[in-house]
Image (cartoon, helix red, strand yellow):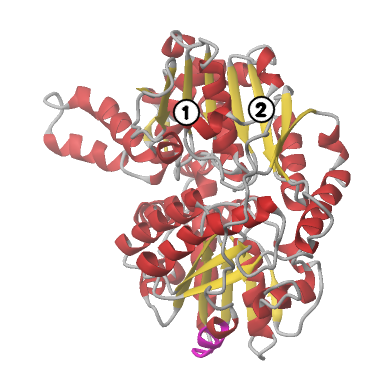
Amino acid sequence: MRYLNKATRNLFFTGKGGVGKTSMACAAAIQLADRGLQVLLVSTDPASNLDEVLGTKLGNHPTPIESVPNLFAMNLDPEAAAKEYRERMVGPYRGVLPDAAVRSMEEQFSGSCTLEIAAFDEFSKLLGDKQATSEFDHVIFDTAPTGHTLRLLTLPSAWSGFIENNTTGTSCMGPLAGLQAQTLLYKHTVEALADSNSTTLVLVTRPEPSAFREAARTSVELQNLGVNNLHLIVNGVFTANSTDDPIATAMQIRGNDAIAAMPDSIRGFERTTIPLTWDGLMGVDSLRKVGKPAADRVDDDNDLPLIDSYPEGLGSLIDDLAATGHGVILAMGKGGVGKTTVAAAVAVALAERGFDVHLSTTDPAAHIAATIAAEDLSGLTVGRIDPAKETADYTDEVLQTAGGDLDAEGKALLEEDLRSPCTEEIAVFRAFAKAVSAGTNGFVVLDTAPTGHTILLLDSALAYHREVTRQASGMPESVENLLPRLRDPEFTRVLVVTLPEATPVHEAAKLQQDLRRAEIEPFAWVINQSLVQLAVTDPTLRRRQHHELPFIDEVKSSLASRVALIPWQAVPPVGLAGLRRVVGSNSSLTH
């Protein structure tokens, strides 16, 4: 963690889901606070787990962390931020305007766009308004997985441009008067992001090809936004204790190969390497040790018993999924748990049983094409929901339908409305609804974006309904029937994917609660990349095996009525052969 010796005031931690962004952000915050510096740690992830990692209940405002003097932390809660934003905009008019007019304003500020702009507004204050954080030496942002974060970081420019070029004073959120006052703040936010003396983007990755590819892609997009001060953390690098354990050897080789093949675009960045630990990084004491000598990290494992009981693999689950002959299968969970691999493996297995299957993704940072490795399989088609294409298609359609009978002034107003950054979210939502509707004639397997983004997508269903209806001339059948289809257990089967670790399991449990509130019942849980079936002797991996057991038991006993377990694969599960191994869950290296 030597990079902290010259840390800038603002530090952003971003990367692919599951690479350890929160752990690295928390470790940096704790270690800076331990030096006597005043530190504010902020999560911008809708599915934040800062509370669990720090052991403190957090809210929408800075909360002191009792066990770490000088450290404060908070979550940017989109719902709470939207409520505060709505009241700030509507409150001054209560008692001044007629009740009907106030109710109309409240309705205008209850849409999905308000949710996004409110969270963005809070983020901008922390970054663009130095007075708002003047008591802190450092502000550290623990962000959502890359796609969501890139969206957040592009908003300062997007909203500034929209406000600057808007000539009518209206938007998808109603009058722009409230936003005009924020223009200077957004300008300062853009400047702070681009200032290398005040802001560092820390790209966190695992020693895995997909994580490196995403870090490389992110670095290019960040540099296009004018963000050039980048640092790379490679988290969880494993070194085998000896060459006697084939699993340990394979794991080290996989990591070394990935590091050796790291894209050139990120190879030149200053780099910090963090070794893999067996016990995860949970709690302040554990986070204080990150990046420090690990002499006491591996304990004697002679007393650990052999593990001989664990859930069965994916095979029988596929049998039941195939029984209906059609429908939608959604792979959901925290970023980095292997949703893409599970979705692709299920799609391949169903296609090989003779069904027509379409595999797609709602994840802006999708890796489906790389997972399938461009191999052809009869009955299987592969696609993705491309935000740029969907936005262009949606804009054209609205202009041709709702704009068809408008005069020149009305058409100009509609075009201006459609240039709002919110239009992309609406277009992607519509494409998601269309993809779900295709499950009436075959199987559609959807690899979803990480949990927070997906929850927002589902939570926003009614708000998006309003937006689609407002902008377009009518409600498409796919949108109208989206929620009934998602709630139909004979049509939609949700696979909750997790790793046998604390944060992925507990985040998946929250996802399940959200799904149930939306009246969607998960079909099964899939525990991915488990070591418990494997015959390991390396001390770190043996300890890690036993560290998994309470989380597997928690899933079996209190969270899921049905569980499948996929062992860690010595050979990366890509291409048809690799994906067949995932379903078979057979390994020559198992007990």
Q: Is residue 318 above or below residue 278?
A: below
Disc 2 secondary structure class: loop
Q: Is residue 134 visible?
A: yes
Residue carrying label 1: 42
Kind of residue indicated by mark 2: Lys
**Is residue 460 shown above or below 578?**
above
Q: Position of residue 459 (x, y in %)?
A: 37, 54
Magenta span: 318-325
- Residue found 33% across the figure and 64% down from its top: 516
Residue 172 visible in the current orientation: no
Q: Main secondary structure of the magenta part?
A: helix
Give me the C-alpha separation between circle 2 and circle 1: 24 Å
Query: Which residue bears the numbered disc 2?
Result: 292
Location of residue 49 (image quadrant) = top left
Who is closer to the viewer here, 512 or 437? 512
Q: Residues within 10 Å of mark 2 (few under 14, many from 20)?
A: few
- State the mark number for residue 264: none
Element at label 1: strand
Task: Locate residue 107, reporting x and y percent.
Answer: 26, 43
